[in-house]
């Protein structure tokens, strides 16, 4: 009885391995690679500065906020233009907490690397959505997936200066008072 069971086990193993080898060598049997969800990569800066590097992605490292998009558009009725970043909350959090995270990125500095030095071309402030300013005072809570905007005003003369100087890096940091 033992000999038959061992013999049966060996024959089954040999047949299974032969079938597996035959499947691998069959040209019609191509395994389809598993499709992974491709995460859409959002640039940090809109069209004129799309090649500049920056540290705005550090917001995503907090795991509370994620960058949804950025665009260059008019910010008021007078036609003043600027960059508008849209972020979303990845979990429920208080508006005060969101404001505290964004305060670490409030001061924006544009730099150009030259041969041996780094030259600061322009500095600016990020302005938050009115929902953040009023919500922080009223103890509101953002739910998961809620989108928030913050913006940077850039006049025409500043835009020309940034384009002409070929800005290559932008640093977001806390506002030092």
Image (cartoon, rainbow, N blue to C red):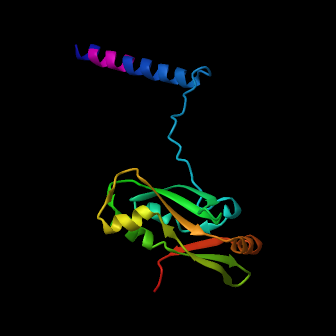
Q: Along the horizontal axis of the image, is 174 left or right of 110?
A: left
The residue positioned farthest toward the front in the image shown = 77
Q: Main secondary structure of the magenta part?
A: helix
User: Residue 134 appears at what percent x and percent y?
Assistant: 37, 66
Q: 13 or 177: which is nearer to us?
A: 177
Quadrant of image for the N terminus: top left
**Which segment is the magenta one?**
5-11
**Horizontal placement of 122 versus 157: left or right?**
left
Q: Which residue is farthest left?
A: 1
Res 61 quadrant in image: bottom left
* Residue at left offset 35%, top offset 54%: 91
Which image quadrant is residue 162 in?
bottom right
Quarter of the image with the C terminus in it: bottom left
Q: Is residue 128 magenta?
A: no
Q: Residue furthest bottom?
A: 177
Q: Residue at x 64, y 66 (%)?
A: 80
Q: Residue at x 43, y 20 (%)?
A: 16
Relative image position of residue 45 (x, y in whole percent): 62, 62
Query: In the image, 5: left or right of 61?
Result: left
The vertical placement of 10 against 74, above or below, is above
Which of the 4 image quadrants contains residue 65? bottom left
Residue 12, image x, y percentages: 37, 17
Residue 27, compared with residue 48, is above or below; it is: above
Residue 7 covered by magenta stretch: yes
């Amino acid at each position: 009885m033992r000999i038959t069971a061992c013999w049966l086990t060996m024959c089954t193993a040999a047949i299974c391995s032969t079938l597996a080898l035959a499947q691998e060598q069959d040209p019609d049997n191509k395994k389809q690679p598993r499709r992974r969800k491709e995460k859409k990569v959002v640039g940090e800066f809109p069209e004129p500065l799309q090649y500049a590097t920056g540290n705005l992605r550090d917001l995503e490292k907090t795991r509370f906020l994620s960058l949804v998009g950025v665009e260059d558009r008019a910010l008021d009725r007078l036609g003043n233009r600027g960059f508008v970043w849209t972020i979303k909350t990845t979990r429920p959090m208080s508006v005060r907490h969101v404001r505290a995270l964004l305060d670490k990125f409030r001061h924006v500095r544009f730099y150009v690397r030259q041969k041996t030095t780094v030259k600061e071309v322009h500095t600016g402030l990020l302005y938050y959505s009115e929902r953040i300013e009023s919500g922080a005072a009223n103890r509101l809570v953002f739910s998961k997936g809620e989108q928030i905007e913050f913006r940077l005003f850039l006049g025409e003369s500043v835009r020309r200066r940034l384009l002409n100087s070929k800005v290559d890096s932008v640093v977001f940091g806390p506002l030092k008072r």
